[in-house]
Amino acid sequence: MTDPMTELQFKWFLTLLTGGVSFVWFIFDARKLLRLRGASSADPSVRDQRFGYIMGLVIATIGVVGSAKYQGWI
Amino acid sequence: MAVVSESLPVPVKPVVSPWNPANAVTASRFLTLPFFVWAVDQGYHQWATLFMLACGLLDKLDGLVARIFNCRSAFGELFDAITDALCYGFGLVIVAAYGWAPAIPVIGVITLGIANTVMRAIYVKRAGRTTNYKSYAMERLVAYTGYLIGFATAGFEVTFFYWLFLPVMVTILAYDTKRMLIDPIPEAS
């Protein structure tokens, strides 16, 4: 059975699927986190969202750095 | 003489059958697993990655279907979380068994995943109703878990992604443990 993509296509497919999605994810979570700036941390829901978005930023950063490593850029 | 009540009718939440399109999409994720195992067994890295990608995309699709058909339910959310755990847990075991992923992080991830499942069960017992524990951080971690399997099948910086996953998961689980076992449970909406 043949592979659906060439090696190079697959490499770029993975990079976009991981690095590209992570980058967009980072922007989304950063915006959501900024919107919560004025919200009170006494509200458990706000605390959970804030923690979730910070973890989202950490995971997205890992995704971007891992993709850059895979491409040999860092 | 009949007594006519003048009070306003109390809105009744529609009862959603568990046999609905969104849960069908969630259940269909299990159909990708035999193809995934076949691809791993045959050494087809690209096909294995694509089958796991299909499983992940169906996870995104079920929420959309639930909104379109207006069939969101507490059971559906719980079923989705259980399906995530089973599909991704199974996928991780397979890639580790075939030597495509490092065993120690996989054992750590599965152990922490089981601990999380047990705490979710305790949370449901504390709540006294069918409810899914909502965690923004865990939603993001589940997506990362799906990616982990793809990283292994594709040979995509496997060591980097697997070893960094563990401290992130420990941090999120520690935070969620406090919420599930100690903090007050919010009222049903």
Image (cartoon, coloured by chain):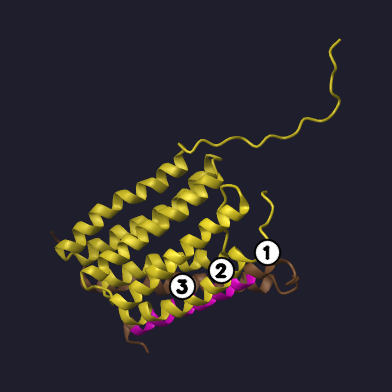
Chain colours: A brown, B yellow
Instruction: Write the residue at 69% across / 66% down.
Output: A44
Q: Are marks 2 and 3 in contact (CB under 8 Å)?
A: no
Q: Give the residue pinned by disc 3.
A: A22
Q: Nearer the viewer, mark 1 or mark 2?
A: 2
Number of marks in picture: 3
Instruction: Please tell me in which quadrant of the rendered image residue A16 appears.
Output: bottom left
Q: Which residues are magenta?
A: A50-69
Q: Secondary structure at mark 3?
A: helix
Secondary structure mostly seen in the magenta stretch:
helix
Q: Farthest residue in the left direction?
A: A1
Mark 3 is surrounded, within 10 Å at the Cα level, by few (under 14), some (14 to 19) or many (20 or more) other residues, namely: many
Type of amino acid under label 1:
Ser
In the rendered image, residue B152, in percent from the top left (x then y), is placed at: 29, 72
Q: Secondary structure at mark 2?
A: helix
CB atoms of marks 1 and 3 within 8 Å: no
Q: Which residue reaches farthest top?
A: B1
Query: Image height check: is A32 above or below B160?
Result: above
In which quarter of the view is residue B72 placed? top right
Seen at 55% across and 45% down, the residue is B67
Q: Residue at x 52, y 77 (%)?
A: B171
* Quarter of the image where one finds residue A43: bottom right
Tell me the CA gap for discs 2 and 3.
Answer: 26 Å
Labelled disc at residue B177: 2
Q: Earlier in the sequence, mark 1 or mark 3?
A: 3
Q: Which residue is at the front of the view, A23 or B12?
A: B12
For badge 3, the amino acid type reads Ser
Kindly identify which residue carries mark 1.
Answer: A45
**Is there a contact, CB below 8 Å, between mark 1 and mark 2?**
no
